[in-house]
Image (cartoon, helix red, strand yellow):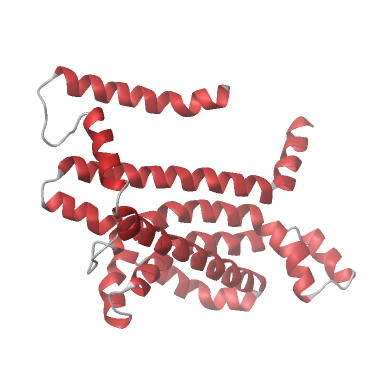
Amino acid sequence: MKGLFFIAALPVILVLIWYISTAVGEKNFFVPTPALLVETFFATWTGDRITTDVIPSLTRLLIGIAGSIIIGIVAGLLIGSVRWLRALTEPTLEFFRAIPPTVLIPVLMLLIGIGDDMKVAVIISGAVWPILLNTIEGVRSMDEVLSDTTHTYGIKGFNRVRYLILPSAMPQIMAGIRQSLSIALILMVISEMFAASSGLGFTIVQFQRSFAIPEMWSGIVLLGIIGVIMSFIFQLIERNVLRWYHGLREIENAA
């Protein structure tokens, strides 16, 4: 109950401030009232736009996140485990990491086209970096005593990755995934603003260009809701995946 109070307290306060500021002063065309926004939200996003805009955007987002996780973890485990490979790839990784993913959109449009593949590629091009770099650092920070023990007992290959490397790096991998979620959501919206005919980013821009201000704000609110839902789902998954880690931290803090 206490946790629910802390979750809801700040949003309620912000909505109250918003309600009072729009009710007392002169009405602003560019800032709808809470009641109008709620009405517009359900009128806009409970009809055909669910299938034409929301579901396609979520599909691209989920594919992009899944691709980022797979590429980031696999490449990170490989680069982090092989010292000479890490030394070889580090300058190149730093170069590509410094390039803003939005700059790659025109290039990807020329190479891949303007379909969903381009939008997914844009998401992966930005969301993969936190996962990749955190995975590499997680592997590098592995306990040397445990590493030597596995060598002594002849644990090699896939079993070494499964029982030593991956669990050791998992806390930092999950931290990287958490960072990548917000990046993926931002890039999903940006990618849909270029050469698109559907999606949340495309629709919000169309609302803005046609001065449908309440509808534009309702799309922004929907993106925020999607972000919150993703965060809660990730917390549930992280709590189960890192149950051993959180238990160990509790024991260490109690001691």
State the residue at coordinates (38%, 58%).
55
Query: Between residues 17 and 153, which one lies in front from this camera angle?
Result: 17
Q: Position of residue 171 (x, y in %)?
A: 64, 52
Find the residue positioned furthest to the right. 153
Q: Quadrant of the C terminus?
A: top right
How many numbered marks are there? 0
Position of the N terminus, as image quadrant, is: top right
Place of residue 240 in the rendered image (x, y in percent of width and height, measured from the top left): 67, 47
Residue at 64% in and 74% down: 83
Q: Is residue 184 left or right of residue 170?
A: left
Q: Residue furthest front?
A: 47
Left/right of residue 5 with respect to residue 100 in the rendered view: right
Residue closest to the far bottom = 111
Against 107, residue 192 (above or below) is above
Image location (x, y in percent) of residue 126 = 40, 63
Residue 254 in the image: above or below residue 17: below
User: Which quarter of the figure has residue 112?
Assistant: bottom left
Residue 50 picture location, percent across and down: 34, 53
**From what the image shows, is residue 184 above or below residue 230?**
below
Q: Is residue 70 above or below residue 248?
A: below
| Residue 147 placement, left or right of 69 | right
Q: Name the residue: 59% across, 53% down.
A: 174
Judge by depth and name the residue closer to the eye, 154 or 200.
200
Q: Depth check: 153 or 68 in front?
A: 68
Q: Is residue 117 left or right of residue 6?
A: left
